[in-house]
Amino acid sequence: MFQGGAHVTDRKEIEAILDHYRTAVYAKDVDAFIELYDEDARVFDLWGRWLYRGSAEWRKPAAEWFGSLGTERSSPEFHDVQIDFGDGVAAVHAFVTYKGLSAEGKELRSMDNRITWVLRKNSEGAWKIVHEHTSAPADFETGKVTLRR
Amino acid sequence: MFQGGAHVTDRKEIEAILDHYRTAVYAKDVDAFIELYDEDARVFDLWGRWLYRGSAEWRKPAAEWFGSLGTERSSPEFHDVQIDFGDGVAAVHAFVTYKGLSAEGKELRSMDNRITWVLRKNSEGAWKIVHEHTSAPADFETGKVTLRR
């Protein structure tokens, strides 16, 4: 669902961001991954910390994530994508499934997350993520997050 | 930090939304609380479910939350509020501390969350939350969420 009377080019540009994310994660390419983010991006990540402040700080866990995969790959798939557009501002939210693939492409495991992005068009006309929020719902009794939707 | 060249009125209107939220939660007023949300709002809540779809569905856990408080109250405080504006679209993210107060106003407990809102100005010129995402970071080893920042 695309709301808010956005230009078709804006819609295509945001879809290109989703593609860029998928491709960068699959390729385990830290530079391509970090290029998605504004240098002042503020990230509320599912794991471990309340806030990553700026793309330089966000680079480290991204590199650790890709490095931890060894010969495996992570292949993200977006589901139920919702986009809201303003003038130079876009907000995206979706479910994302990270499929863990062997070097041969066999699916080994799968994890679901919820993702929200706020993007701004910068002075060069490129959309950058200024805020990311990922999570999974926590069980009220145990306090543990559920990673399958 | 207010970015994006928004009108001062927009900025004040978004600050009024934060006030409205604080006041409605403190008053345990379900009607005032639900009034903040667009009828098609999609909520990624910290607890229990992947998605609440629409303000009618979101009303039930809100009523349960307020009902569970008995004579106590919850007093939300926003910290480190960031707002991005577009034309008729705003995105807010912040830390929020819910202080649990006794009937006499004594602080009994305190819980931190991360919150992201996407708001749209509707045809009547009122800002409504079209997307909410709340979470707390999960420990990588135990999978449990941490509720103190």
Image (tube, coloured by chain):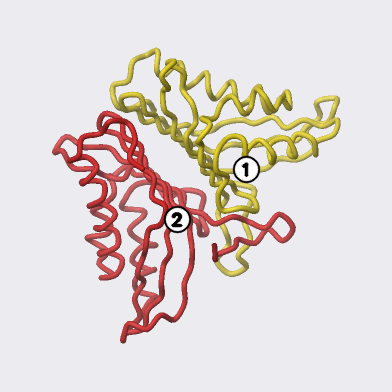
Chain colours: A red, B yellow
**Relative horizontal placement of residue B39, taking residue A73 as reference (left or right):** right
x, y percent for residue A130 = 33, 42
Percent x, y of residue A90 = 32, 38
Q: Which mark is residue B146?
A: none
Q: Are marks 1 and 2 on the same chain?
A: no
Q: Is residue A64 left or right of residue B113?
A: left
Q: Give the camera-side residue of A93 and B5.
A: A93
Q: Are marks 1 and 2 in contact (CB under 8 Å)?
A: no
Q: Position of residue A23 (x, y in %)?
A: 25, 64
The x and y percentages for residue B76 are 64, 31
Crowding near pointer 1: few (<14 within 10 Å), some, many (20+)?
many
Residue at 58% in and 62% down: B139
The residue identified by callout 1 is: B112
Give the chain letter at badge 2.
A
| Three-letter code for the amino acid on which mark 1 is drawn | Asp
Q: Which residue is mark 2?
A: A95
Q: How would you rate the neighbour count of disc 2 (Cα within 10 Å): few for under 14, some for 14-19, many for 20 or more?
A: many
* For residue A41, above or below residue B30: below
Q: Residue furthest top?
A: B9
Mark 1 belongs to chain: B
